[in-house]
Image (cartoon, rainbow, N blue to C red):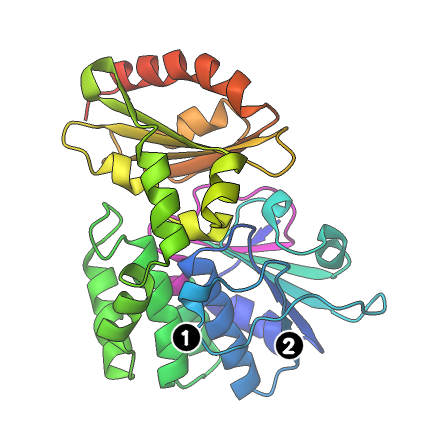
Amino acid sequence: MERVTPRQAAGLIRAAHRVLVAGHVRPDGDVLGSMTALGLGLRQAAIPADVWAATPVPARYSFLEPVIALPCSVPAGTFDLCVVLDTSTIARADIDQSLIRACPVIIALDHHPETDAYATHACTDPTVGATAFLVHSLLAELGIAITPAIANALYTGLLTDTGCFTYSNTDRRAFALALDLADAGADISGIATRIYNCMTRPQVSLLAEMLATLELVTGGRGALMHISRTMFDRTGATETDMEEFVNYARAIDGVAVAALVTELPGGRQIRLSLRSKSAEVPVNTLAARYGGGGHVCAAGATVDSALASFLPVFRPVLAAFAGAHRS
């Protein structure tokens, strides 16, 4: 795997005949905004490209320009370059991995700390708060004008992955990019309203049921919640409705590490979501114990276990981790 700059990545893209753009499963605002912005930029540059995701765009992000489409069946060799956004491992890609691996050139455009060897080229920077930063730099190298639609998409990624500019990854670069995007026509207040102040009734019902499971461990330093399939069925909510739910536990005064355990369809796996308030509590190290990873303050893992079996085993692990790390 070769490390490349945004300028070098732009050169590879210009030389491609047809580009595939992909992101990660359980898409969030950063990957959706980044995919949309890159797709719009490639369209502006007249570079043939398809932006594919197996997961439909969640309703809260329906204001984004409709660039992302469901994958289609294509002949082998259709794409000669793939850009994979916002994931450090191909295992989390939201399209068939064989489509990616079939590309002679694979660019990982990402801000996670580590990238596995699936890509031929890695354009990464773990010091920036969102993959949207890297897409913005890539578009600049491609000579793309930042239209209001592109600005909206990039601002969505920036806003969500910095937690509305409250996470520790927020620095002067984040505010500088926000200013540039506002000047380019991003709908600053409208985007925030659509993402954070437009909850559906099923979503609120699921939130209430999840909060009812809240447990505090280690004198309130750790917080544990869970969501079962029964709760999804009872409320009519979906997995896309629970984005950022784990942050309700992190927001509790005194909590240093928050965990949300979600039962996945079929009941044989769970999704572990972990959050902390500072880098002094590196939840990515806890996620790594279960084969996962992520950022220092936001990480997760998918575990082969039933919910009822996992919770009693994980509870003392969380308690010990919360006690061992002081923020």
Residue projecting furthest to the left: 253
Residue 157 vertical placement versus 230 (above, below): below
Q: Residue at x 41, y 37 (%)?
A: 299
Q: Secondary structure at mark 2?
A: strand
Residue 104 vertical placement versus 24 (above, below): below
User: Which quadrant of the view contains residue 296?
Assistant: top left
Q: Which residue is mark 1?
A: 63
Quadrant of the rendering where the C terminus is positioned: top left
Q: Residue at x 53, y 72 (%)?
A: 10
Residue 265 vertical placement versus 174 (above, below): above
Q: Nearer the viewer, residue 130 or 138?
A: 130
Label 2 close to label 1 by CB (< 8 Å): no
The location of residue 23, given as percent across then percent down, is: 56, 58
The location of residue 28, given as percent across then percent down, is: 44, 55
Q: Residues within 10 Å of mark 2 (few under 14, many from 20)?
A: many
Classified by dominant secondary structure, the portion drawn in magenta counts as loop
- The mark that comes first in sequence, 2 or 1, is 2
Q: Nearer the viewer, residue 37 or 243?
A: 243
Q: From this viewpoint, is residue 291 visible?
A: yes
Q: Is residue 28 left or right of residue 199?
A: right
Circle 2 or circle 1, nearest the eye: 1
Q: Which residues are magenta?
A: 112-133
The Cα–Cα distance between marks 2 and 1, rounded to whole angstroms, is 21 Å
Residue projecting furthest to the right: 75
Task: Tell me the amino acid under the disc marked 2.
Answer: Ala
**Res. 49 mark:** 2
The location of residue 171, given as percent across then percent down, is: 21, 55
